[in-house]
Amino acid sequence: MTNTPVPYSAIVEARRRIDGLVLKTPLCFSPTLSELAGNPVHIKFEHHQVSGSFKPRGAANAILCLDTEAKKRGVTGASTGNHGRGLAHAARQAGIRCVICMSTLVPANKVEGIKALGAEVRIVGASQDDAQVEAERLVHEDGMVMIPPFDHPAVIAGQGTLGLEILDQCVDVSTIVAPLSGGGLISGIALATKTNRKEIRIIGVSMTRGAAMHASQKAGKPVKVEELATIADSLGGGIGLDNAFTFKMVRDLVDGIVLLSEDEIMQGIDHAYWNEGEVVEGAGAAAIGAMVAKRMDVSGPTVLVASGKNIDMKLHHRIISGERISI
């Protein structure tokens, strides 16, 4: 790939840099989804990653790229939950201060998970944009280093290591389906895989309630979208009106975007548990939900990325018991 805001070489370097700090997660064949699709379907069990989501890849890479002086000042970032957990985990590994800023929409289990990793938590406002303002204040007034959840070259490169793993584990993959929020994960995966095999199709999956990247792609520029409560809470939040990397990468590298209803997301959670034996959160079940709901046509070997498992277990129990939650 040429003319990309983040070079492919950065992903290769990130893989070397974070080796031993993150897990190489399993890629598992799904008989039920393969029968449904009429093609081999595999699930990338990235929810088995340390901290319960893919986020430590990018967070660890970004922290390791900091110089000694920057590490002394500590790191901060706004998060809908999983980035905060990944950043807190990576900061603890590096022995540096970490402050995570979140909105009131973030579920309590994710807040507590971040605190358990030793990070400080600031709850500010009713959207990720509000939380971002507090993170920026910590940078300007306290001198902390901002590590954002997606629009950052080292974060994107770290997430791209997941794409390299998929190529190693499924050499003939034809389509990769991944959750889409700010675009850091799917941008990294797309760059990693399409650089090696440009014919691979990349499909992003978001929810209908406040899909900021989808709205921005339709508008042809980053736009602000109202952040709404959703079962796929990790997919919430804006992409930033000054987005420098992921908007362009999604525009140029992603082949399609699918939007799911809340019920379709819950179908993904339900399928993951009863058919795959896995606990997966709403965002993590998005790709599975899109397949179960037959919202996309795929041909050839397909990989669905299950990106996280950090769901409140009482909520999970209600969903897998057949209750359809009203948001």
Image (cartoon, rainbow, N blue to C red):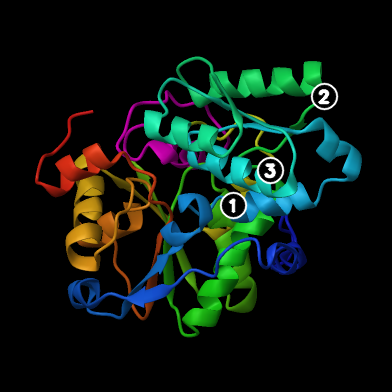
Q: Is residue 78 above or below residue 11?
A: above
- Residue neighbourhood size for the residue with mark 3, other residues' Cα within 10 Å, grouped as few (<14), some (14–19), many (≥20): many
Front residue of 225 and 110? 110
- Residue neighbourhood size for the residue with mark 1, other residues' Cα within 10 Å, grouped as few (<14), some (14–19), many (≥20): many
State the SS at label 3. helix
Marks 2 and 1, Cα distance to the nearest angstrom? Answer: 23 Å
In the image, residue 218 lies in the stretch drawn in magenta: yes
Whether label 2 touches label 3, CB < 8 Å: no
**Residue 148, percent from left and from top:** 65, 37
**Residue 91 badge:** 3
Question: Which residue position is annotated with label 2?
Answer: 143
Earlier along the polypeptide chain: callout 1 or callout 3?
1
Q: Based on the displayed image, in which of its 4 quarters is residue 117 positioned?
A: top right
**Residue 184, percent from left and from top:** 58, 49
The quadrant of the image that shows the C terminus is top left
Q: Based on the displayed image, in which of its 4 quarters is residue 45 positioned?
A: bottom left
**Residue 56 badge:** 1
**Residue 214 badge:** none
Instruction: State the extent of the magenta-drawn residues as a range.
Output: 208-236
Q: Amino acid at mark 1?
A: Pro
